Amino acid sequence: MKKSICHLPLKLLHNAVIARSATTKQSRKKFLDSAVKPRNDGSRLLRCARNDGLIKFLILFLFSFLFIPISVQAANVVNVYNWSGYIPEKVLQLFTKQTGITVNYSTFDSNQELYAKLKASPNAGYDVIVPSANFVTKMRDQHMLQPLDKSKIPNLKNLNPWLMNRSFDPHNRYSIPYLWGTTAIIINTKYYPHVDITSWQQLWNKKFRDQLLLLNSAREVFAVALKSLGYSLNDTNPQHLRQAYQKLIKLLPNIKLFNGEASQTIFMDEDAMIGIILNGDAYLAQQQNPNLRYIFPREGVNIWIDNIAIPKNAPHLKNAYRFINFLLQPKIAKMIALDMHYSSPNLAAIRLMPKNIRDNHILYPTKAELKHSEFQRDVGAANHLYQHYWALLKING
Amino acid sequence: MNSDRLFTRFAIGINAAWLTLFALVPIILILIVSFLKPDPNFFVLMHFSPRSYLTLINPIYLKVFARSLLLALITAGCCLCIGYPFAFILAQLKTRFKPLLLLLVIIPFWTSSLLRSYAMVILLEAHGILNSFLLRWHIISQPLHLLYTNTAVLIGLVYCLLPFMILPLYANIEKLDLRLIEAARDLGASHLQAFGKVIIPLTLPGIISGTVLVLLPAMTLFYIPDLLGGAKSLLLGNLIQMQFLYTGNWPQGSAVSIALTVLMSLLLLLYLRLIPKAQRSQPL
């Protein structure tokens, strides 16, 4: 961060953020020092204040904080903007320990949030961001990302070639995979012992009335309908989208809820018995509730990739590359994948994992299981149609 | 005293500046945006267009408005049915615990309502507290699947908004002159007649202010239907959020917000009209 003038309360806040995110001892100490100091000054001043004007004095005193400019030391930092809870704290600490670079870690909850933030303030100061594949395309097309200098990321060689050079970002010019996964069907075999699910089509079965959990995302839900109709889940044909919408209207009586963030617990606690789920959540839910089964339907599933990218105007480019290369180290990538319970794109990291994880079909499916599966891509102008039908669906719900 | 005047000006000035900066300016911005054209890449185009307001008449939007209003009305009805007897009994109590009982009504406000909604999830879920209790005492044999139903939404809304109904009712009923009821009974009115012809009209201001206070938030507490109802049906709050974050249609989102603000102002206006000035001075 450049040497800048900032107000005292802001500095306290800033330090609090650092102390929370990258809890190094020094930054914590700095935080405590700066937090304690004004309080001491305050109590000394308070004793001087006359009793009758105490309240007035207090108010004026508090406001005076707003106008004390103090300078913040220029620091060696990297500003990372990632999904909330999408990196182990330990990885950030290790990076700071090895390089002396402080990580300012901020989080978002959806690609849309990330996009809106960067669009509204292109100089927000982020150095590393983690958009999903479709948003890589979208942001690339709007010149919000900068091309990556591969020579600064030697650890790129560790990555799975199957996940590289995909159509959402040819030659990985702007992005490299961080974690990937699938979205498929989960079913509770205790409640449905004799149901053998092999196709998306079976979700429309009347016996699942008011039972389904679908993800709260337009693309994921439309993927179910498009796939069952035999279309691509990246379809942009308005006619096909209309058909998919009509098909989903017929699915409404079976839908119990839309949920993205808590689906793991909901299946684990048996508040829903069947639905669609991200593989990482399915893995965790199954660890707690062995009745759950994760199924790849024969029409193919949605493969998603979250990618590391550098936004235009990133202020700490050198640190950004060091951070990215650090994330691709086998040991670090392994730590991330094991902690987040998603699939690692890092082959060297997978080799370091315990056998039961490497052989787990939820996390590392076979080629046969992924037959007909597709990578989710940006649908460009058709995105508007997806959102339009999605809103219509919710209104009808 | 000079310093006192200075302080008064300072205090008022700070408040006015704060409200201008963080309430008035954003509302004006929303109003301006609602009259612009949407643009998927740059949020808005600087062209005047009333289209966002014309789309509001679209049956789709009317349906969401109607659904939000219906849910709010049912919630207000339930709150009234539960809150009225409670407020009545509380107001008539002659015990030194009365302030304590009133405090108990207010205590839930000390915790964020979002947090309390998450707590409701734990209460209502299939392996939750309510179900384990009912199963333990053999009242049911299969867990009730309450969570993610309309019942759960209603329970959540009524729970969250009940104090808003009780407090104005209590303030009103406490002032009720019990001798009027005695007089009605002496003149031959039955219990039911006394209630319908004396008590209800006299406590009407409380009923109306309580209802308005419940109606307004019930229209917009979108996280309760999201958390407890499973995000299945769109309410006004969700509609606005969706327009801004997902569809990228800021003018439309702004227009819905403005429409909601106007609707609420109308409800408040109705409240001011229905209740005579003299009765309005109760602490709300």
Image (tube, rainbow, N blue to C red):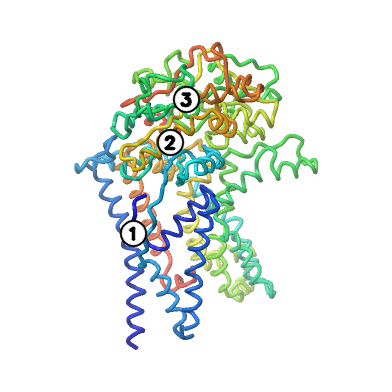
Specify few, some or many for label 3: CA neighbours under 10 Å numbering under 14, 14-19, or 20 or more.
many
The chain letter for the residue carrying disc 2 is A
Identify the residue at the far left of this view. Answer: B47
How many residues crowd around disc 2 within 10 Å: few (fewer than 14), some, or many (20 or more)?
some
Alpha carbons under labels 2 and 3: distance apart = 25 Å
- For disc 2, the marked residue is A322
Residue where numbered disc 3 is placed: A304
Q: Position of residue B129 (x, y in %)?
A: 71, 45
Q: Residue at x 48, y 12 (%)?
A: A372
Q: Amino acid at mark 2?
A: Arg
Point out the residue furthest to the right here.
Answer: B137
Above or below, comparing residue A299 to residue A248 in the picture: above
Q: Secondary structure at mark 3?
A: strand
For the residues marked 1 and 3, what is the alpha-carbon distance in whole angstroms? 42 Å
Q: Earlier in the sequence, mark 2 or mark 3?
A: 3
Dot 2 or dot 1: first in sequence order is 1
In the image, residue B29 above or below residue B13: above
Q: Viewer-nearest of labels 2 and 1? A: 2
Front residue of this view, candidates A211 and A198: A198
Please state the chain letter of the residue tagged with numbered disc 1 in the rendered image: A
> SS class of the residue under badge 1?
strand
Above-or-below relation of B8 to B259: below
Which numbered disc, 1 or 3, marks the residue that appears first in the sequence? Answer: 1
Q: Which mark is residue A5?
A: 1
Amino acid at pointer 3: Trp
